[in-house]
Image (spheres, rainbow, N blue to C red):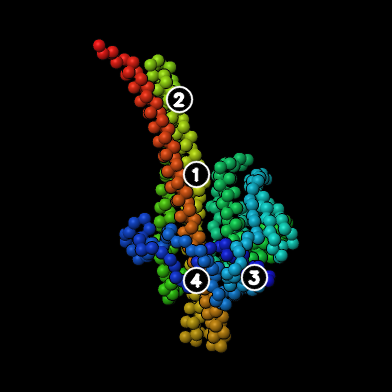
């Protein structure tokens, strides 16, 4: 029963049926037009037409059960084997709720930083309590992200918002920036909580529950500096060496990522430009209304008309502000998050290639008998399992991520379209009402001025 309860947690993650098969849904038109290299890929990058009701989380392939074996510091945990099987009759259950709020500024002689309160509510048996409250700073989030990448190198870790530093800003931080970061950090944690594997990572649990001194002590238990440097040097050397034959499905995946990165970055720039232009338009319109009020003071015959125009402008200005608020809260964060996701995906592909490159180097050494044959054969066997596990993990998480991406972007653009329709209908109704009142007034005046016929 405990295994079934845990397995049900990942169903809200949204992985399409057959998650590890490598079959990705899509349509036959390139994203945002077709030219050059975009013809190489179907426009499944932003396929918005799917509606999969029957979702699976991760492959039933037993090789996925060894996901934690990538890191020598992370022994395989039973919790890493959850969600391999979907239980058809069980309802979607969410048992981990995370809120990030109450940003607080801290000023020391060395630095100024912000901490955020993190409240976690859960019904999971592995937690000592049902509710936890801790405070974390941005560096703690960076640590968590690094630990997740270390333990699960070919899973798609949610992105963190970029680090932001302004010289000379010691006691004050921009409130809008802090609020934007707070929302992004909350989304980061909830993305992890909803992930069928990452949600059971031990470092994630420590992050949510440990007090500051306990977290500091836990951080020091990681590999030593020399060990980390050795791993980094080897990874760089392997990445420079490259892989001889990346499997075709990962070539397609890499092409997908490159095209997606181009398109989502372009959408991000356009969205930011639209928001900036609307801000400028709103600022000018806000000054436009009072001018008509001043004008009406010197035009006795046009007082009502000019005041009516000013009233319409004021209503449209308020509608524009509401529209911009929806744009900044609903569309811009979603688009920019996937800009960051595109960078994360490139990192995941590099880590997958590094694992394969390590295997390739051992196979090459065995061919030329550069070392002890028996030892190399044993190492190659382990590396083959590691590569297979890494590939299966990435393929399963890839389908899950694509499904979530398509839903997120479809929802964001649909909401924006509905908001735009409502905005223009509201402005149109405002001006139509004003024009109707002026037409009625004009007809009344014409009727009064018309000479009587004898």
Q: Which residue is mark 2?
A: 290
Q: Give the quarter of the figure containing the N terminus.
A: bottom right
Residue pictured at 41% horizontal, 69% vertical: 252
Asked if the residue under mark 3 is in contact with the one under mark 2, i.e. CB atoms within 8 Å, the reply is no
Q: Give the quarter of the figure containing the C terminus.
A: top left
Q: Which residue is mark 3?
A: 4
Q: Nearer the viewer, mark 2 or mark 3?
A: 3
Q: Which residue is mark 4?
A: 18
Asked if the residue under mark 4 is in contact with the one under mark 1, i.e. CB atoms within 8 Å, the reply is no
* 55, above or below 445, in the image: below
Asked which secondary structure carries label 1, the reply is helix
Q: Nearer the viewer, mark 1 or mark 4?
A: 4
**For marks 4 and 2 on the same chain, the one whose residue lies earlier in the sequence:** 4
CA gap, disc 3 to disc 4? 20 Å
Q: How packed is label 4: few (under 14 Cα within 10 Å), some, or many (20 or more)? A: some
Q: Nearer the viewer, residue 43 or 230?
A: 43
Q: Which residue is mark 1?
A: 326
Considering every residue shown, the one lying at the far top of the view is 454
Asked which secondary structure carries label 2, the reply is helix
Left or right? Give the position of 109 relative to 278.
right
Position of residue 27 measured from the top left corner of the image (x, y, whole percent):
38, 63
**For marks 2 and 3 on the same chain, the one whose residue lies earlier in the sequence:** 3
Q: Quadrant of residue 73?
A: bottom right
Q: Nearer the viewer, residue 359 or 273?
A: 273
CA gap, disc 4 to disc 2? 61 Å
* 338, above or below 374, in the image: above
Position of residue 439 measured from the top left corner of the image (x, y, whole percent):
35, 25
């Amino acid at each position: 029963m405990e295994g079934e309860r845990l397995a049900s947690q990942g169903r809200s993650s949204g992985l399409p049926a057959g998650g590890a098969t490598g079959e990705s849904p899509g349509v036959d038109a390139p994203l945002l037009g077709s030219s050059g290299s975009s013809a190489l890929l179907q426009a499944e990058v932003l396929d918005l037409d799917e509606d999969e009701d029957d979702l699976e989380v991760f492959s039933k392939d037993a090789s996925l059960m060894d996901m934690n074996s990538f890191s020598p510091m992370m022994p395989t945990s039973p919790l890493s084997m959850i969600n391999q099987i979907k239980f058809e009759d069980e309802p979607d259950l969410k048992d981990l709720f995370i809120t990030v709020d109450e940003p607080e500024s801290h000023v020391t002689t060395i630095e100024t930083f912000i901490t955020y309160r993190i409240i976690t509510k859960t019904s999971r048996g592995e937690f000592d309590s049902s509710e936890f409250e801790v405070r974390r700073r941005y560096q703690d989030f960076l640590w968590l992200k690094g630990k997740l990448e270390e333990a699960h190198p070919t899973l798609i870790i949610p992105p963190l918002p970029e680090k932001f530093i302004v010289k000379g800003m010691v006691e004050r931080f921009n409130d809008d920036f802090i609020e934007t970061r707070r929302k992004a950090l909350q989304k980061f944690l909830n993305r992890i909580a909803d992930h069928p594997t990452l949600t059971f990572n031990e470092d994630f649990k420590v992050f949510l529950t440990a007090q500051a001194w306990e977290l500091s002590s836990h951080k020091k238990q990681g590999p030593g500096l020399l060990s980390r440097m050795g791993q980094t040097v080897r990874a760089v050397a392997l990445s420079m060496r490259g892989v001889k034959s990346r499997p075709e499905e990962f070539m397609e995946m890499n092409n997908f990522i490159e095209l997606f990165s181009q398109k989502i970055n372009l959408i991000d720039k356009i969205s930011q430009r639209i928001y900036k232009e609307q801000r400028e338009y709103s600022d000018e319109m806000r000054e436009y209304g009072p001018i008509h009020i001043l004008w009406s003071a010197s035009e006795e015959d046009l007082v009502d008309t000019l005041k009516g125009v000013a009233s319409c402008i004021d209503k449209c200005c308020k509608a524009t502000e509401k529209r911009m608020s929806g744009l900044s809260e609903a569309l811009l964060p979603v688009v920019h998050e996937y800009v960051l996701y595109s960078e994360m995906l490139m990192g995941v592909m590099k880590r997958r290639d590094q694992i394969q490159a390590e295997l390739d180097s051992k196979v090459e050494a065995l061919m030329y008998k550069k070392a002890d044959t028996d030892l190399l054969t044993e190492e190659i066997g382990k590396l083959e399992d590691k590569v297979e596990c890494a590939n299966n993990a990435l393929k399963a998480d890839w389908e899950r991520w694509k499904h979530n991406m398509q839903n997120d972007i479809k929802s964001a653009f649909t909401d924006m379209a509905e908001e735009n329709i409502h905005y223009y209908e509201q402005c149109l109704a405002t001006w139509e009402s004003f024009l109707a009142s002026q037409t009625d007034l004009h007809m009344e005046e014409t009727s009064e001025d018309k000479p009587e016929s004898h």
